[in-house]
Amino acid sequence: MKKQKTKKWTLIFLLSAKNNLYMEQLKVINEIYGVGSSKDVNLVIILDGLGGDKFSESLERPAIFYAQKNTDFLTDTHFHIFRKHNTTLTDPKQLQRLLNIVVENFPAANYGFFYKGHGGPGETDLARGMFVTRTAYINPKLPESRLRKMYGDKQKGWIFEGYCEYPAIKKNKTNKKPILLIYSKRNTKTLSYKKLASTLRNVFNGKLGFLCMDCCWAQQIENAYNFIDVTDYYIASADEMPALGLGYTQLCSHFIKRPAIRPEEAANLIVAVYYNQNYADYDSEVAEFRKMGVSVTSLNLKEYHKFLRDFSALCKLFIKKLKEKHDYTYYLLKNSRAKCLDYTYKDTDRLPVSKIDYPMFNIDLIWLLENLLFYSLDDQREEILLKVIYQIQGSLITSFMGSHYKKPVLGRRAIGGNGIAICFPKNSKFEERSIIGNKEMKFYKVSGWRELLTRYYDYKPVLPLQESLAGEGMNSLNFDVDDDKVSVSRDKQRLIFKRVARRKKTK
């Protein structure tokens, strides 16, 4: 293919498929191919996948595909592929090579970038390692815990990464469901958001119109900090998202029909399309998803520095108060934090560190700030809190599709749903498992958030709660009220607690 003339948009889709999202990623690819590129818009896919048992081994190597109209992906030829099997996109240099090839061959006035995969604590799940897959046929009603016991050790010397739904490749008389089992070796490295940001900065040099993270947990205020000089518009979710992708057929079709769309409009469009296509977790066949909630948020990173200025001032004030042994400040932080439940499947506050599978410790940032304001008795603190809340809701967030969480009045325990999170572990042991100590996450040092948390964890109150309240001129402020009515740990339909119950019976 000859180098193209400059188009209005080139949309780049980085798909991580060395995991149990393999079949889902193929569906996304087929959606993009179903629309196809046009005279004004390029649709380019970078796939890091698996051989997939009966599929081509070439899919195991990172490759670029150009989605042309009326072309089938499974019969299409890649535009570019790495020759070596051990090439990994966890190496920023290799990812940058591919992106430079895209920019050189598919130039455009505007670029949009999508990452689709699993999200983690400040990192993608683009993997380095060796992978093999096996097909198995199982009873559709077989629980996941039983499946792991049956197949977890089948590939000796390999780690069982999980499984995904798989199209039947042979007939079976017992109506068993085909699945693709995924095993890995030496899969110990991933690409962090910080390195992804650095790579995008090097390639696009301020020309990236928007960045969309179609994955779990990416809309943390500290993650957004990594991308402030990469793009103006950052779209992501603060939740562990059960919904399957953004709705790429409709999204790509919008760009094809209206290629003059501007980056801010495109960022808001992504939120709108997601709402239209996939905001139906409450209709899901999985009871856990129906109660979970989904969100996606677009941030205007041009406004981030204003938020950071006021948030840093707030941290500085809290640090000063804790240095002065102001007990009420400690209780204020403790009680406001206690009103914020975790976004993950578990109530992590109620678990020992060894039992926590997802050490995210995210809480809704706005819900935390609102409760700090609700309990605050200090005019200076209230003024700064109001500024920070205003900066987030009035300037930083440009569009937001909120979850359907039922949030009670201020001062009551609740899961958030305002579209942006922050890492706030309950105690220092949890902090050790979190991303707070990650040196790549510059937000923690720049804002003062890590110093504040350290002083909070190390703080030893001089006065008990009631004496501290009396010293502030208050008798009671609804402190230390634990509202179990909204606690997700009491939900018998949650899959994780069903598995725990089965383990207890077995013992």
Image (cartoon, helix red, strand yellow):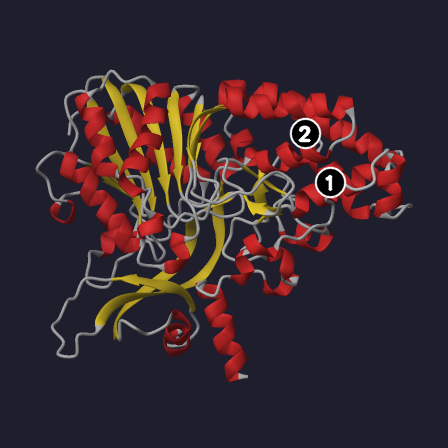
Mark 1 surroundings: few (<14), some (14-19) or many (≥20) residues within 10 A: some
What distance separates the C-alpha of mark 2 from that of mark 1?
17 Å
Asked if residue 38 lies left or right of residue 186, the reply is left
Q: Is residue 305 visible?
A: yes
Residue 282 vertical placement versus 387 (above, below): below
Asked if residue 221 lies left or right of residue 325, the reply is left
Three-letter amino acid code at the position of disc 1: Leu
Name the residue carrying label 2: 447
Name the residue carrying label 1: 333
Residue 327 vertical placement versus 481 (above, below): above
Q: Residue at x 35, y 50 (%)?
A: 282
Which of 49 and 163 lies nearest the eye of the viewer?
163
Provide residue 14's location: percent of width, then percent of height.
34, 39
Q: Which quadrant of the rendered structure holds the N terminus? A: top left
Provide residue 76's location: percent of width, then percent of height.
14, 44
Three-letter amino acid code at the position of disc 2: Ser
Indicate which disc, 2 or 1, sits on the residue closer to the N terminus.
1
Dot 1 lies on which element?
helix
Mark 2 surroundings: few (<14), some (14-19) or many (≥20) residues within 10 A: many
Asked if residue 81 lies left or right of residue 480, the reply is left
Dot 2 lies on which element?
helix
Q: Which quadrant of the rendered structure holds the C terminus? A: bottom right
Provide residue 424's location: percent of width, then percent of height.
64, 44
